[in-house]
Amino acid sequence: MPECGCRLGSARLRACPDRKPQSRRLPIQLPPPPPTRTLTKNTYSLLAPAYKAQQSMSAQAQIPVAPPVFEIPRPVDEFGQDGGKFYRCYDALAEEIDEDMVKGLKEQLDGMLIFAGLFAGVNTAFLALTLPLLSADTADDISALLAQNNAILIQVLTGRNDTVPTATPLPSAGFSPSRDIFAINALFSLSLAFAIISSFLAVLGRQWLVYYRKRSGGGPEKQRWEQLKRFLGAERWQLEPILDDVLPSLLQIGLIIFCVSLILYLRHLSPAISAIVGIPMYIGLAFFIGSAICTVQDKFCPFQSPLSHVLIWSARTIPPAIRDIIPPLLKLLKATIKLKWLLRMVAFLIYWPIMLICLRREEGSLKKWLCDLFPRAERSSVRHWLRVLIRSIKHWLRVLIYGRAEESSKSLQVIAIQRAIRTSDDPETLLHATANIIAITDVPQIQHLWSDPSFQDRFIEQVRHAYSRMLQLRGQNQVNIATASQRLYSAAAAHMILSSSSDWDIYSRFRKLIAVLEETIRLPAIR
C-alpha cells in the first residue's frame, strides 16, 4: 500500500501529485492466423466491386447535382428542320403507343386461343353423345330380327303351320329424330362452329399484328411514315375494335348457345336436373347483361365487354339517327301517298324494259316518253340521283382497279402533329410539335389540322395552362421558360387563325383564346 494512501485507480492516480505513474501491462491479444492465399484472393475478388461502388457513390454524393436545363424550341421555317428533335420525340411516342396496343391485343388473342381450344374439346365431347341420337339405333334392328327368328323357331318346334310375317319393316326404316334432339344437335354444332371461327380469326389476328409491326427497308424517315400509314389503315379499317370486340363476342355467343343446348339436353334426359343446372346459368346470364347495362350509365364502369360497347354505341347512335331519319321518312310517306307518283314509279319499274324494246328504233320517242312520265321538277331530282349514283359507281370502280390513294407527305406531317398533341404528356414533345405547327403554311393542311375535335380540346387546354404547368418543372429560370412556352403556344394559335382564308366560324372556338393571347402580351419579359 503506498504512503499517501491512494488507491491504484486511474482517477486517484491523476488526483494524487506525489504518486508517480506506473505503466500498466495490458494482456497481449494475438491476431488470428492469416488466411491462405486462395481465400484472400477470393475474398478480395468478392469485396472489390462493392468497395469500388461505395467509393463511387460517396464521390458522387459529394458532387452537387445541377438541375436540368429545359430549352424552349424556336419556331422553324420548314417542317422537321429542328435538328430532328420533333421526329425523335414522335418516334418514341409512336413506338410506345403501337407497342402498348399490339401487346394488349396479343395477350387477349392468346387467352382466346386457349379458351377456344378447351371450349371446343368440351363441346365435341357432348356432340359425341348427342350425334348418335340423330340416326337409328342398330340394336333395335337386331332385336327385331332376333324376335322374328325366335317366332320361326317356336313355330317349327311346336309344329304349327301359322305363317310368320317375315317382311316386317325394321325400326330404322321409319326412324326420324325428334325435334328436341334435332335442336340440341343443331345448337351444339353451332356453338362449336363459333368456337372454331373465333380461334381461326384469333390466329389470323396475330398475323395481322405481325404485319402491323413489321419493319420494311429504307431509312428512319421512310419507316416512320410507313408505320404512320399502317396506323391510319388500322384506324380506318377498325383493326382494334375487330380484335378487341368482335372476336370475343363470337366466343361469348358460342358459349351462350352451348349453355342453352346443354339445358335442353338435360331436359331431354331429366327435367329436374335441367332445372338445377339452369338456375345458376340464368343467374350468370343476368349478371352479364346487367354488368353491360351498368357501363351505359357510367362510362368508367370496370365491367367492360363487347356487349357493353355495343350498348354504348347504340345509346349514342340510335337516338340521333332516329331524330334524323323520322322527318325524311315522314316526307317520303307523304310523297308516296300521292297515287299519281306511286303509279308512275310502278309503271317505270315494270314496263320500262318493254318500252325500251318498243321505242328503241324510233328517234326521240324514248326521250319524249320519259318527259311525259316525269314532269320537269321530278326530272331534275331523278337526274340528280342518277348523277350521284354514276359518280359513286365510278369512284368504287376506280378504287377497285387502281387502289386507294395514299396520304401525301404534308397530310402525314399534319397527322403526326395531331397524334403527338392528342396523346403525349411530355412537355418537350408538345413544345416541339407546337413549334412545327408554325412551319405549316398550306391552308387546307391547317384546316385539316384543326378539323379534329380531340386536337382542338387538347390544344386549347395546352394554351390555357402552359404557363402554370411549365412553372412546376424543376430547373433554372422557371419564369422565363414558362413565359417562352406560353408565347410559343400563342404564336401557333395565332398562326392557325391568321393563315386561314376560310370562314372564321370554323375557328369559333379560338374566340375563347383571345383572353389568353392578351394575357400573353402582359407576361414578364424573358431575361
Image (cartoon, rainbow, N blue to C red):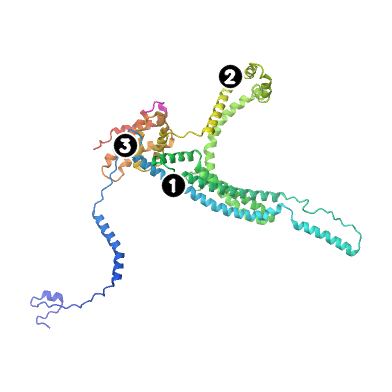
Quadrant of the image for the N terminus? bottom left
Please report the bounds of the magenta region as a residue range.
Answer: 499-505
Sequence order check, earlier mark of 2 and 3: 2
Q: Is residue 459 magenta?
A: no
- Image mark for residue 377: 2
Which x, y percent locates residue 475?
A: 28, 45
Q: Is residue 508 above or below residue 91?
A: above
The residue carrying pointer 2 sits among few (fewer than 14), some (14 to 19) or many (20 or more) residues within 10 Å by Cα, namely: few
Q: Is residue 503 magenta?
A: yes
- The one nearer the camera, 209 or 104, is 209
Check disc 1: other Cα within 10 Å, few if <14, some if 14-19, many if 20+: few
Residue 230 is situated, as x and y percent measured from the top left of the image, at 46, 40
Answer with left or right where residue 218 lies relative to residue 62.
right
Residue 128 appears in the figure: yes
Disc on the earlier residue, 3 or 1: 1
By secondary structure, the bulk of the magenta-drawn segment is best described as loop
Q: Amino acid at mark 3?
A: Gln
Going 40% across and 30% down the picture, which residue do you hit?
A: 507
x%, y% of residue 403?
51, 34
Q: Report whether 366 appears left or right of 22.
A: right
- The residue at which mark 1 appears reads as 99
* Inter-mark Cα distance, 2 to 3: 58 Å
Element type where label 1 sits in the image: helix
Amino acid marked by disc 1:
Glu
> With 91 as the anchor, is 69 left or right in this view?
left
Residue pictured at 67% horizontal, 56% vertical = 272
The quadrant of the picture occupied by the C terminus is top left
Real-space Cα separation, disc 2 to disc 1, in angstroms: 58 Å
Q: Which mark is residue 361?
A: none
The residue singled out by tag 3 in the image is 486
Q: Vertically, is 202 above or below 273?
A: above
Looking at the image, is mark 2 or mark 1 earlier in the sequence?
Answer: 1
